[in-house]
Image: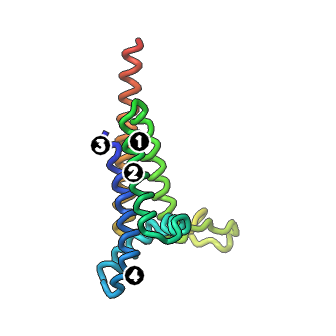
Amino acid sequence: MAMLLAFPGFFLALFLTERLATHALALYPASPFLWRASLELRALYGEFSNRLDLLSGYTLWIQIVFISALFLSLFLVAQTKRGPAVCFLANHVLVLAGAFATLIANNFMVASFDVAGQTPDSVFFALDFHLNLPQVVVLVTGIAGSLYSHVVVLSAARRDQKIRA
């Protein structure tokens, strides 16, 4: 069960790190480490951070409690009979969330359908990817977590099918 929760836990831990680094900048704005951590993670979690700031009224303690409660509830649900299915869903939702956040951070836009205005290398989408290390790590671990959740759910389904037969 721990492997099924590895990616959601990692995703939420990085999100919490981004929130802490951003709020720590208010206390020590001259820290190059805090600026780098905040900016690198902000590229991935910027949209989520903006929404969480609005919901919490910019209160750090409420944000910490919310992110921790989210992981704790996922951990408790994972201990139930339907835990692998919930972890399967959580892994896939967070991979999609990370992918869309990466696209938003890279100013993803649909290219024009005007053929004359198209560059030779962009037919449908204007993609200009500049992925930083946290984005790459989140996407790779998310894909690995999703693949592992597929293996777990499919093996459980095969085991249940053999028991019924």
Residue, disc 2: 71
- Residue 95 rendering spot, x and y as whole percentages: 44, 52
Give the residue type that dot 2 points to: Phe
Callout 2 environment at 10 Å: few (<14), some (14 to 19), or many (20+)?
Answer: some
Residue, disc 1: 87
Q: Secondary structure at mark 1?
A: helix
Callout 3 touching callout 2 (CB < 8 Å): no
Callout 1 touching callout 4 (CB < 8 Å): no
Left or right: where does residue 95 sit relative to residue 7?
A: right
Callout 4 touching callout 2 (CB < 8 Å): no
How far apart are labels 3 and 2 at the CA level? 13 Å
Q: Secondary structure at mark 3?
A: helix
Residue, disc 4: 26
Give the residue type that dot 1 points to: Cys
Of the numbered discs 1 and 4, the one sitting upstream in the chain is 4
Of the numbered discs 2 and 1, the one sitting upstream in the chain is 2
Give the residue type that dot 4 points to: Ala
Of the numbered discs 3 and 4, the one sitting upstream in the chain is 3
Residue 156 seen by the camera:
yes
Question: From the viewer's perspective, is residue 72 above or below residue 152?
Answer: below
Callout 4 environment at 10 Å: few (<14), some (14 to 19), or many (20+)?
Answer: few
Counting labels gives 4
Callout 3 touching callout 4 (CB < 8 Å): no
**Res 2 label:** 3
Q: Residue at x 35, y 48 (%)?
A: 144
- Residue 85 rendering spot, x and y as whole percentages: 44, 36
Callout 1 environment at 10 Å: few (<14), some (14 to 19), or many (20+)?
Answer: many
